[in-house]
């Protein structure tokens, strides 16, 4: 240990005597290098320019997001208003359908004045009476079946039971005057449940087989909305324009135009 200390002392003395520097000198940086200063300035300008560009892009993105939110809000509001109109229209149709049935029932129940009987009329000529009675019974059964099926929708709100009841009615009474309405109600049930394909089937049957039905405008508009929901925009425009052209100045035409504006 003593030898080590002595050796260190000797080395220190020699370095002092010979004038060796004890500390290493720091590297010299030329702060007057104009080329380096220019490069730093250019780099700073590029960074600042990119920062400003990013800020402008972010501001534009924020503005677009705000506009998109406003558009979505307007679309949701319009859809809500349209749904309210459709609901009101369905209620009016239900009331109209019920009134029509009541009027029909009243007319059927009105007494018919029968001609005075003549004792000279042969008994054989009265044989046609049972046929009219059978016809009346059949008509009452037809109307009763239809009313029972519609009652499942209006009064009991049991659409699951109304579907087979309406389908059975349409099959059992293919020539019934209520059959167009049966297809309409089936289409409406599937439409409310978003069963688009089945709704299309019944609305299409109504339009194709019963073009004079007063429910054709509504069914045509619903077909347009269904095609829009399925992504078939060209077909949707075709149905909606058909309502506007065929039934102008009606509520269905106005609602169809609103739907077109959303496409």
Image (cartoon, rainbow, N blue to C red):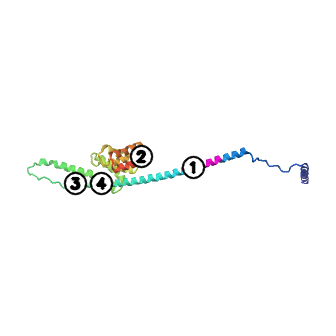
> On the image, numbered disc 1 is attached to which residue?
56
Q: Which residue is mark 3?
A: 107
**Mark 3 or mark 2: whose residue is earlier in sequence:** 3
Disc 3 or 1, which lies upstream in sequence?
1
Is residue 21 rendered to the left or right of residue 81?
right
- Structural distance between the alpha carbons of marks 3 and 4: 16 Å
Secondary structure at badge 2 equals: helix
Q: Which residues are magenta?
A: 45-60
Asked which quadrant contains residue 102, the reply is bottom left
Residue 53 part of the magenta segment: yes
Give whichever of discs 1 and 2 has the lower sequence position: 1
* Image quadrant where one finds the N terminus: bottom right
Residue linked to disc 4: 96
Residue 190, visible in the rendered structure: no
Q: Which residue is denoted by mark 2 in the rendering?
A: 228
Q: Residues within 10 Å of mark 3 (few under 14, many from 20)?
A: few
State if disc 1 and disc 4 touch (CB < 8 Å).
Answer: no
Q: CA distance from mark 3 to mark 1?
A: 75 Å
């Amino acid at each position: 240990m003593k030898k080590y200390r002595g050796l260190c002392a000797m080395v220190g003395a020699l370095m002092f005597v010979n004038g060796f520097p004890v500390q290493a000198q720091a590297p010299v940086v030329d702060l007057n290098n104009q080329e380096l200063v220019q490069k730093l300035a250019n780099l700073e300008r590029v960074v600042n320019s990119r920062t400003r560009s990013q800020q402008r892009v972010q501001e534009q993105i924020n503005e677009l997001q705000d506009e998109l939110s406003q558009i979505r809000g307007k679309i949701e509001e319009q859809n809500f208003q349209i749904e309210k109109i459709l609901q009101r229209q369905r209620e009016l149709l239900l009331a109209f359908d019920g009134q029509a049935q009541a009027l029909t029932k009243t007319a059927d129940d009105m007494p018919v004045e029968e001609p005075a009987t003549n004792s000279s009329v042969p008994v054989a000529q009265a044989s046609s009476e049972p046929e009219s009675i059978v016809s009346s019974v059949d008509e009452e059964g037809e109307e009763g079946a239809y009313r029972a099926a519609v009652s499942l929708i209006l009064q009991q709100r049991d659409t699951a039971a109304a579907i087979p009841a309406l389908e059975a009615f349409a099959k059992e009474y293919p020539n019934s005057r209520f059959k167009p309405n049966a297809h309409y109600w089936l289409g409406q049930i599937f439409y409310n449940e978003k069963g688009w394909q089945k709704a299309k089937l019944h609305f299409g049957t109504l339009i194709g087989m019963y073009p004079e039905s007063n429910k054709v405008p509504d069914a045509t508009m619903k077909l347009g909305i269904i095609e829009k929901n399925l992504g078939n925009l060209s077909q949707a425009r075709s149905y909606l324009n058909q309502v506007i052209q065929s039934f102008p100045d009606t509520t269905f035409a106005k609602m169809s135009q609103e739907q077109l504006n959303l496409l």
